[in-house]
Amino acid sequence: MVDAQRSITTRRLVLEPLSEGHTDAVVRLFSAPEMSTYLGADLSDRERARTMVRARLAYAGPPELGHWVLLLDGAPVGLAHLRPSHELPGGLPEIGWYLDARYGGRGLATEAARALLRYGLDEVRLSSVWALVHVDNAPSLRVAARLGFLPVGEGEHYGGPHRVHVALPGRGR
C-alpha cells in the first residue's frame, strides 16, 4: 500500500505531483481556450486558471492521491488527478486528464491515464476508479474505452452532461 503521492514514470511521460512551482506553467497551459471546452469554466482567463491551480494545491484528501502535472521531455503538456470525487457520492475515487491539444493524437492522454489507473488500482488498492467524461468529448471517451472503463450511466456533472464510467481491478488497462 502506498502512503504518499509520488511521481510516476511511463515510457514517454513523468507524472509529477502538482506543486507551487508548476503554477505558472499550468496557468499557461490552460490559457488555450480549447482546454476549457468541457470544464464548465473558462480557464483561459488567467486569474480563473490561477484560482483552479490554488484549489488543486490545497488538496487535503488521502495523501497517496491528488493532482499530477504531465511532463514530456520536462515540459508540462497536461494535468491529471486521482482523488475523491467532488461530483460523485461518498467521495468515490475519480480520475481525470487534461492534455494540451497540440499533443493530441499521440496516445499521451491514454499513457498518463493508464499509469494513474494502474497506480490507483494496483498500488493504492482502490476498489474502483471512476471517470466523468463530457458526452461530447470524443477523445476522452476513446481513452476511457481503451482503458477498459465500463460506462454505467450519465448525469449532470461539472456544469454539463457527462458519462459516468468505472474501472475495476483486473479489468482492461
Image: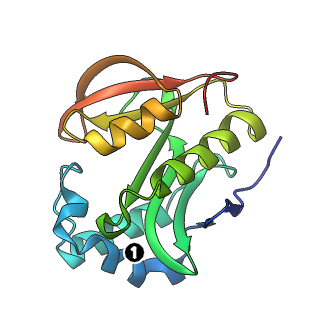
Identify the element where label 1 is drawn: helix
In front here: 83 or 31? 31
Horizontal side, residue 137 vs residue 80: left or right: left
Name the residue that disc number 1 marks.
Answer: 26
Q: Number of labelled discs? A: 1
Residue, x 61% and y 34% (percent of image)? 173
Q: Position of residue 80 (x, y in %)?
A: 48, 55
Q: Is residue 51 visible?
A: yes
Residue, x 27% and y 21% (percent of image)? 154
Horizontal side, residue 129 vs residue 46: left or right: right
Q: Position of residue 34 (x, y in %)?
A: 19, 62
Q: Colour mode? A: rainbow
Residue, x 70% and y 22% (percent of image)? 170
Horizontal side, residue 52 vs residue 93: left or right: left
Quadrant hosting residue 114: top right
Quadrant hosting residue 152: top left
Q: Position of residue 29 (x, y in %)?
A: 33, 74
Above-or-below relation of 119 to 135: below
Inspect the image, locate mark 1, and give the three-letter code of the amino acid beneath it: Val
Residue, x 42% and y 25% (percent of image)? 165
Horizontal side, residue 130 vs residue 159: left or right: right
In front here: 59 or 5? 5
Q: Position of residue 163 (x, y in %)?
A: 30, 27
Q: Is residue 86 visible?
A: no
Question: In this view, which residue lies farthest toward the front?
Answer: 106
Above-or-below relation of 164 to 137: above
Q: Mark 1, residues whose alpha carbon is within 10 Å: few (<14), some, or many (≥20)?
A: many
